[in-house]
Image (cartoon, helix red, strand yellow):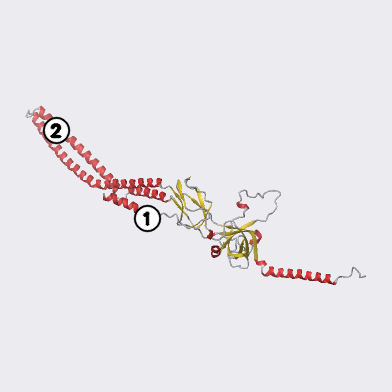
Amino acid sequence: MADSKTPNPRRKRLLLIAAGVFLLIAVLWAIWYFIYGANKESTEDAYVHGNLVQITSQVAGTVVAIEADDTDMVKAGQPLVKLDPADAQIALMQAEAQLAQTVRQTRTLYVQNDSLTADTNVRSAEIVRAEADVARTQSDLQRRQALAKSGGVSGEELLHAQTAYKTSQSNLAQARAALAGSRAKAQTNRALTEGTTVENHPDVLRAAANLRSVWLAGSRNTLPAPVDGMVARRSAQVGQRIAPGTPLMTVVPLDQVWVEANFKEGQLRDMRVGQPVILHADLYGGDVVYHGKVAGLDAGTGSAFALLPAQNATGNWIKVVQRVPVRIALDPQELAKRPLRVGLSMSVEVDLGTTQGEPVTTTHAQTGMSTSAFDPAHGEADALIQRIVRENLAS
């Protein structure tokens, strides 16, 4: 009978093979780590983010048309919501009438300049005549007073001469007052028109500015899309009365989304701006690869911006490793081919082998966003103002 303690050659061989396999795996893993894995940082805590552009009205009104709904793709400048234009049209008609009336009133000031100058000249001539009349009546009075001493004229004739003298003095005072009033009116009228024309008179400019403001308010009854993107969260309803600032829908520019990957603090030491990133989306599976670059580091951890920030100044404090959002810019061509949606989860792997960029903790500038969808067509308002001024100047 064989001794049970005698080693089994087959078992021994299997153990040696298993040990060799594990050793080989360890060696391969070590080689992989030092050549490849040591220069990689990865995380599953990553999500797609994007700009959520709210569509809000700048004026109050009633919704009469909705021309885009959820999941619709829209272009910048495309009308999304239309408000009832009736009130704006009435206000515009009133502003047009006010401008026309102001032009006519201002034109009258310039016409009065010539008439007031002529009136001043007439008043001056009247003063000359009144002064001559005073001199004549005064001479008559003095002559009759001399004759009255010798009884050459009656008392009644002397009384008539005195009355005529006083009347001529009163007429001279009235003429001088009328001349002063005429000169004051002419001076006031010149002050209102001096150095200006009807077209650039302050009253006309004020009425034109009011017309432009009313026209601008009317143009805002149509709400355009600020950017290209997909409509989401439509809350506007036909017939709804809205106030300025009421959110009506959201436009998400899907071609401008990015990924925020939440890395642990210790994973950021060697991370730099511009390092290449490999990403996978659960939506498309592991076979679809997205390429991106590290764009920057957020200003704080998620807990720092939470509604209720963590209170660490306690006696039972325990250190918790924090995660900081790292912004990753995606390849626009890959986004156009396989669009992502805001909020999707991503798998992120950053290649730390590139050491040419700035450290991710360094502050750097980001490009801004702008839109021309809300730029009003001021040329139309200017043409309307010029037409009204021209028509009321010629009439």
- Near-viewer residue (294 or 46): 46
Question: Could you tell whether 192 is left or right of 363 in the image?
Answer: left
Question: Could you tell whether 164 is left or right of 98 in the image?
Answer: left
Q: Is residue 394 visible?
A: yes
In which quarter of the view is residue 112 placed? top left
- Near-viewer residue (23 or 122): 23
Q: Which residue is mark 1?
A: 379
Asked whether the residues under the numbered discs 1 and 2 touch, taking CB atoms below 8 Å apart as contact, a structural biologist would say no
Query: What SS does tag 1 mark?
Result: helix
Q: Which mark is residue 164?
A: 2
Q: Residue 384: x and y, percent?
A: 34, 52
Which residue is found at the position 74% from the left and 71% from the top? Answer: 24
- Near-viewer residue (268 or 209): 209
Mark found first going from the N terminus, 1 or 2: 2
The amino acid type found where label 2 is placed reads Ala
- Near-viewer residue (56 or 152): 56
Q: Residues within 10 Å of mark 1 (few under 14, many from 20)?
A: few
Q: Residues within 10 Å of mark 2 (few under 14, many from 20)?
A: some
Q: Is residue 191 visible?
A: no
Question: Could you tell whether 301 is left or right of 13 in the image?
Answer: left
Q: Which mark is residue 267?
A: none
Q: Of discs 1 and 2, which sits in the foreground?
A: 1
User: Which quadrant would the N terminus be assigned to in this image?
Assistant: bottom right
